[in-house]
Image (tube, rainbow, N blue to C red):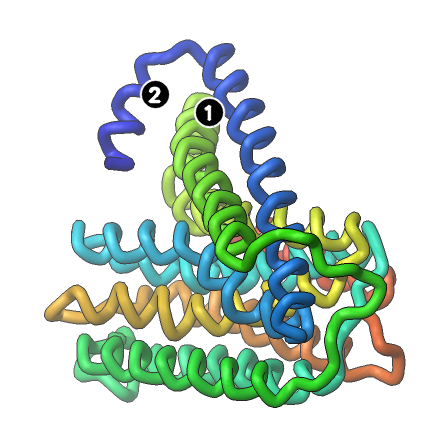
Amino acid sequence: MKELLLQNLELWPSLILFGVIAVSLFILSRGADLLVDEAVSLSVHWGVPKMVIGATIVSLGTTLPEASVSVMAAINGNPDMALGNAIGSIIADTSLIIGLAAIMGHLVVDRKMILRQGKIQLGAGILLAFVCLPFLSAGDSGRIYQWMGFVFLGLLVAYIYISMKWAKSASESPQGFEEEDTSLWMQIIKMLLGVVLVIGSSQVLIPAVEIIAIRLGIPQSVIAATLVAFGTSLPELVTAISAVKKGHGELAVGNIIGADILNVLFVVGSAAAVTKGGLVVPTTFYHIQIPTMLISLGLFRYFSRGRKAFIAKREGIVLLGIYATYLILNYV
């Protein structure tokens, strides 16, 4: 599907492609607004903290682009794209998106959820780095075997189960919001519509941006390592910015935490599970991608557990600096 869309878009002039990008961004933002509004309504309806909703339901929806891109890349014999997309998305989520959200608004953190979900987030990143190590496989480079993919998917089921269990035990409900006079099913349908708009528009936006980048002379390897990962993280980016602007910073934080966990368990797990040979880890990943991922996760964990109940603007600047350095190193 993506290949067919890419072939069609390649025939269009650059001026029209810029128009496609603009329209896609508009639809993406509207879908994110709808997704955030209905996610908050659901959290009020169920009496569940917004951070829990962000870390489970919203994250599952916004992580679908990463999963679809990585699975198709793995099936087509491109493990660099599959694994690079997942790791690059974690870096973009944790450094770029949290950094921008912290600078643009008040990024509140729920200490109880950071203590629970944050441990799983950091643990998932460490687990991914560990299974990528060369000594676990026969060759010079690492390999994430197919059976490891199924283990990751099993851990995904366990994560969703325990998150729902924590949600049921959460007694606090979001403050400052009144529940809308809308049926539960209508809220769910509207939220699903928001997910469809976010994912659908990103599926058009990504190939359009790729074509423009190629026409501007940006190397394909750089596009795979950075642009595709950034493109598949656009739903999280727009959802986070929309959430912060609406005063739901904890929803943005929960979405990123959940997205990082799902990028490991769902995206990498699915991509490895559909390939008999597993995912080969390029040696270059040990120099830039994996270290940057661990640094980003470690800094986010440190900032979110500070004395303050929010991530400050200066901390957001530090995270943005990590992402800028990551981009420069990829180009070098």
Point out residue 303 in the picture as x, y percentages from the top left corner: 77, 76
Point out residue 277 in the picture as x, y percentages from the top left corner: 13, 70
Inspect this view and state whether residue 271 appears.
Answer: yes
Compared to residue 20, the image places residue 198 above or below, namely: below
Residue at 17 percent of width and 65 percent of height = 274
User: Which disc number belongs to residue 212?
Assistant: 1
Pick the residue in front: 329 or 89. Answer: 89
Residue at 62 percent of width and 81 percent of height = 118
Residue type marked 2:
Leu
Point out residue 3 in the picture as x, y percentages from the top left corner: 24, 34
Splitting the image into 4 quarters, where does residue 42 fall? bottom right
**Marks 1 and 2: which is nearer the front?**
2
Residue at 71 percent of width and 53 percent of height = 243
Residue at 85 percent of width and 77 percent of height = 309
Q: Horizontally, is 38 left or right of 104 in the view?
A: left
Pick the residue in front: 283 or 45. Answer: 45
Point out residue 108 in the picture as x, y percentages from the top left corner: 80, 68
Inspect this view and state whether residue 321 appears.
Answer: no
Q: In terms of sequence position, does the residue under pointer 1 or pointer 2 come before the other?
A: 2
- Label 2 neighbour load within 10 Å: few <14, some 14-19, many 20+: some
User: Which disc number belongs to residue 9?
Assistant: 2
Image quadrant containing the N terminus? top left
User: Which disc number belongs to residue 233?
Assistant: none
- Label 1 neighbour load within 10 Å: few <14, some 14-19, many 20+: some
Q: Horizontally, is 207 left or right of 293 in the view?
A: left
Residue type marked 1:
Ile
Callout 1 secondary element: helix
Q: CA distance from mark 1 to mark 2?
A: 10 Å
Looking at this view, name the residue that lies furthest to the left.
276
Compared to residue 77, the image places residue 286 above or below, namely: below
How many numbered marks does the figure carry? 2
